Image: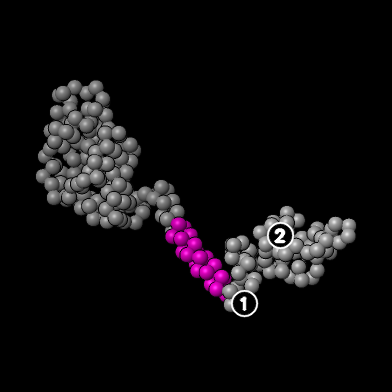
């Protein structure tokens, strides 16, 4: 049979057959007097085996080893199966992460753990969207750079929940958020004074140190205006 017929019977392209010749997986048969390659049933069987191995996930660099002998084929397939299992595990983890993120964005207050608890506080306080996003982004940095430890965020949420006058605290936060960039000294001072009485209740919350502290400060300075930063500095 000629190259086209071989390729059609094996369900591959002529280009694939030629590529297998080039990399040495499929030996080139002798040519007939008219210059055409003449393939046999043996060539078709080998090509089918190559195709099945490739479809099973065996890399072309390993196909030759798998074709040499059954023992080698078993070893190669063991490696392929282990790789498939690892990829499936990663995909399952990715799927759960996608589901979790989708729920967080669809209904943040119904999410599990600190994400849901943080969203519930934002919702109860009526915190503006931009301020809630900054708060969530700060929590994201803290948890990630703490190796997944959510305890610092949980402590902060617990401290807010224990405030004797939570409405007054949230009102002070709203005033901070509403502070215009060109707010005068008096306005900045009023915001700082409104926040100051609540600091003692939050004093027990651990303060991030080192690189994390620097990144959090950078994030605040990127998101807050000069007047808001000045009001916080006064504390």
* Label 1: which secondary element: helix
Circle on res. 21: 2
Q: Which residues are magenta?
A: 74-95
**Mark 2, other Cα within 10 Å: few <14 / some 14–19 / many ≥20:** some
In front: label 2 or label 1 = 2
Circle on res. 70: 1
Work out which residue is located at the far bottom of the displayed protein and give it: 71
Quarter that holds the C terminus: top left
Circle on res. 51: none
Sequence-first disc among 2 and 1: 2
Residue 89 seen in the current view: yes
Quarter that holds the N terminus: bottom right
**Mark 1, other Cα within 10 Å: few <14 / some 14–19 / many ≥20:** few
Left or right: residue 75 compared with residue 194? right
Q: Would you say residue 93 sits in the magenta stretch?
A: yes
Which residue is rendered at x = 22% and y = 27% of the image? 227
Q: Would you say residue 48 sits in the magenta stretch?
A: no
Q: Is residue 34 above or below residue 228?
A: below
Give the x, y percent position of residue 37: 82, 60
Gap in angstroms between the C-alphas marked 2 and 1: 22 Å
Residue in front for this viewpoint, 48 or 147: 48
């Amino acid at each position: 049979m000629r190259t086209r017929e071989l390729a059609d019977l094996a369900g591959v392209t002529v280009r694939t057959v030629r590529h297998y010749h080039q990399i040495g997986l499929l030996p080139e048969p002798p040519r007939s007097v008219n210059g055409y390659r003449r393939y046999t049933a043996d060539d078709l069987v080998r090509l089918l085996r190559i195709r099945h191995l490739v479809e099973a996930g065996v890399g072309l660099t390993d196909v030759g080893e798998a074709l040499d002998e059954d023992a080698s084929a078993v070893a190669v397939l063991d490696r392929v199966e282990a790789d498939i299992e690892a990829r499936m595990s990663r995909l399952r983890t990715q799927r759960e992460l996608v589901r979790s993120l989708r729920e967080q964005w669809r209904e943040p207050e119904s999410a599990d753990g600190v994400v849901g608890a943080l969203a519930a506080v934002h919702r109860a306080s009526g915190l503006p969207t931009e301020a809630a996003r900054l708060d969530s982004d700060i929590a994201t940095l803290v948890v990630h750079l703490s190796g997944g430890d959510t305890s610092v965020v949980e402590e902060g949420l617990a401290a807010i929940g224990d405030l004797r006058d939570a409405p007054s605290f949230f009102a002070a936060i709203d005033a901070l958020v509403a502070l215009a960039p060109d707010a005068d000294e008096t306005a900045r001072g009023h915001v700082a004074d409104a926040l100051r009485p609540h600091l003692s209740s939050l004093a027990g919350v651990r303060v991030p140190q080192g690189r994390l502290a620097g990144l959090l400060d950078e994030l605040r300075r990127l998101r807050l205006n000069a007047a808001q930063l000045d009001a916080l500095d006064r504390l």
